[in-house]
Image (cartoon, rainbow, N blue to C red):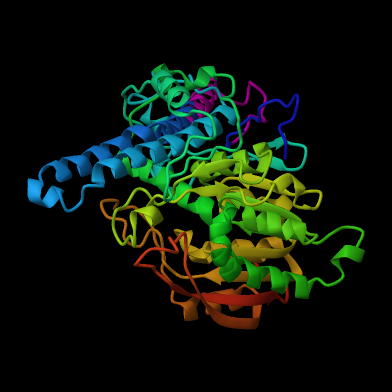
């Protein structure tokens, strides 16, 4: 998973009809329409990726705004009340250093990222008057999206990028300022503060060479909801790649790994290891652990927020504990102490490249249904593992149908997760689809597509929860093993 010496950036291939007829059979205007549609999709691709990168780069500014709001509230206290919390100014200083440490990790992550497309592309000339060529609302924020996968090989992991399309407002943000700020804020690794405020960048890494695609001219200010996704990613890093996330991994991943180990006892003796797909792989830890068990393992993830981060951890990590982040600083609620809120988390807890993965481990970006409905995947997988995934669907029936299509006869589907349908409470989008089945209905639909339940039970767990917080949401998740007993006839 170390960086390859000479590896070309992967290309994003749009999923659209290609010209197969002779020029005499296709009118010139049709050729032009296809060409413009392809250009529009490429420009939307660049625009959406700029927005995601901008969300990461806007993290320091948005976090500083939160901190200034907390300081304003503190200044409104009476002198007598201020005297009761005299440590608050020092806490604010510590918070700024924590934000700086998180920003340092983010900027290094972005510096290592190699965009699969030209980010300078613009929509000028394609919007407005050409609306008949524009893709549908799948290009709006939080919609599922088409994707094609092209390999970007590393020494240990095939990494395949995704595409995502969202509309972006126009504004500017100075990346150069962030670079200067981070270079100034990070002194040598002996810089520290007592009682949980330690800044311990043991990695000693220097900033990577500056990328032209990070130039401020192609950056934008983004809505705070986008920066909230960045904060969510930071919490997800703890779940997948920190020692502090081990309890959650034991609750969620361990039952899955034990079941795979039990179901495929002879996998080490086979000439070709069994193949396991992990849709909704997030930051990649579960897919990696399955690979370490001796499976050909592929993680699938549609979020570019996740893909950029997982690629960095999987492919560029040099040693365990290389980076220090502060994931719990963005809320002052339900903290037992300031030291708990400001405690450092070292990541990753293991060196991915030295974990013992099986050859063929890969990550594939894109919408699960769009990517795996291709005929090349039909009946190709021995196992499909879904963890906190099936309720991310607009149409869960389509997910179940796709899982059935891609599994071999006799293949197994292992699932763990709730039914917190992600699009159930989407307001203001009349055309937003959300099919919300009860667990009973999910099992009935699975039976229709040839699945027979072999095991099922309930597992109590959390998801990206601060283990030291006074409030922790717990899920009573459905855990099952289903086996595909027979081929399913096409339905109308």
Eyeballing the image, is 488 above or below 340? below
Residue 353: percent from left, percent from top: 74, 45
- Quadrant including the C terminus: bottom right
Magenta range is 17-42
- Quadrant including the N terminus: top right
Q: Is residue 66 magenta?
A: no
- State the count of labels: 0
User: Residue 380, can we see it?
Assistant: no
Residue nearest the observer in this picture, 124 or 246:
246
Residue 135: percent from left, percent from top: 44, 37
Residue found 41% across the figure and 50% down from its top = 195
Q: Is residue 294 left or right of residue 488?
A: right
Residue nearest the observer in this picture, 411 or 155:
155
User: Residue 54, can we see it?
Assistant: yes
Q: Is residue 436 left or right of residue 450?
A: left
Residue 470: percent from left, percent from top: 34, 67
Residue nearest the observer in this picture, 335 or 443:
335
Residue 360: percent from left, percent from top: 78, 48
Residue found 61% across the figure and 45% down from its top = 321
Q: Is residue 28 magenta?
A: yes
Residue found 8% across the figure and 46% down from its top = 79
Residue found 73% across the figure and 70% down from its top = 260
Residue nearest the observer in this picture, 177 or 147:
177
Tell me the quarter of the picture where residue 449 sits: bottom right
């Amino acid at each position: 998973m170390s960086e390859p010496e000479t590896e070309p950036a992967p290309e994003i291939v749009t999923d659209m009809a290609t010209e197969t007829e002779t020029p005499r059979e296709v009118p010139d205007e049709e050729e032009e329409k296809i060409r413009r549609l392809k250009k529009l999709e490429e420009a939307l691709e660049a625009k959406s990726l700029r927005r995601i990168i901008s969300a990461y780069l806007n993290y320091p500014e948005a976090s500083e705004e939160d901190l200034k709001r907390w300081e304003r509230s503190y200044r409104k206290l009476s002198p007598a009340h201020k005297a009761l919390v005299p440590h608050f100014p020092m806490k604010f200083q510590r918070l700024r250093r924590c934000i700086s440490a998180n920003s340092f990790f983010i900027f290094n992550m972005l510096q290592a990222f190699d965009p699969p497309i030209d980010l300078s592309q613009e929509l000028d000339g394609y919007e407005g008057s050409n609306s008949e060529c524009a893709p549908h609302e799948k290009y709006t924020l939080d919609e599922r999206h088409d994707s094609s996968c092209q390999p970007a090989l590393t020494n240990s992991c095939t990494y395949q990028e995704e595409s995502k399309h969202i509309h972006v407002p126009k504004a500017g943000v100075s990346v150069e300022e962030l670079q200067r700020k981070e270079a100034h804020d990070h002194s040598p690794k002996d810089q520290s503060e007592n009682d949980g405020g330690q800044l311990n960048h043991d990695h000693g890494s220097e900033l990577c060479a500056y990328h032209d695609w990070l130039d401020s001219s192609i950056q934008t200010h983004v809505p705070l909801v986008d920066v909230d996704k960045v904060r969510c990613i930071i919490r997800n890093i703890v779940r997948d790649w920190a020692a502090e996330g081990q309890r959650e991994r034991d609750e969620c991943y361990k039952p899955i790994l034990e079941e795979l180990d039990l179901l495929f006892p002879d996998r080490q003796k086979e000439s070709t290891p069994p193949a396991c797909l992990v849709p909704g792989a997030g930051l990649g830890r579960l897919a990696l652990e399955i690979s370490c068990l001796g499976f050909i393992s592929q993680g699938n993830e549609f979020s570019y927020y996740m893909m950029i981060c997982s690629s960095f951890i999987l492919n560029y990590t040099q040693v365990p504990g290389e980076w220090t982040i502060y994931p719990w600083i963005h809320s002052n609620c339900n903290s037992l102490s300031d030291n708990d809120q400001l405690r450092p988390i070292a990541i990753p807890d293991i060196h991915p490249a030295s974990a013992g993965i099986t050859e063929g481990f890969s990550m594939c970006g894109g919408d699960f249904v769009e990517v795996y409905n291709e005929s090349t995947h039909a009946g190709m997988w021995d196992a499909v593992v879904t963890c906190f995934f099936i309720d991310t669907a607009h149409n869960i029936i389509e997910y179940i149908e796709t899982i059935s299509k891609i599994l071999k006869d006799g293949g197994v589907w292992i699932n763990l997760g709730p039914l917190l349908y992600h699009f159930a409470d989407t307001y203001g989008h009349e055309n937003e689809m959300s099919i919300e089945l009860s667990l009973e209905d999910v099992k009935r639909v699975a039976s229709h597509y040839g699945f027979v339940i072999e095991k099922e039970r309930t597992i109590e767990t959390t998801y990206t929860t601060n283990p030291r917080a006074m409030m922790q949401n717990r899920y009573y998740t459905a855990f099952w093993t289903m086996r595909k007993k027979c081929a399913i006839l096409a339905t109308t």
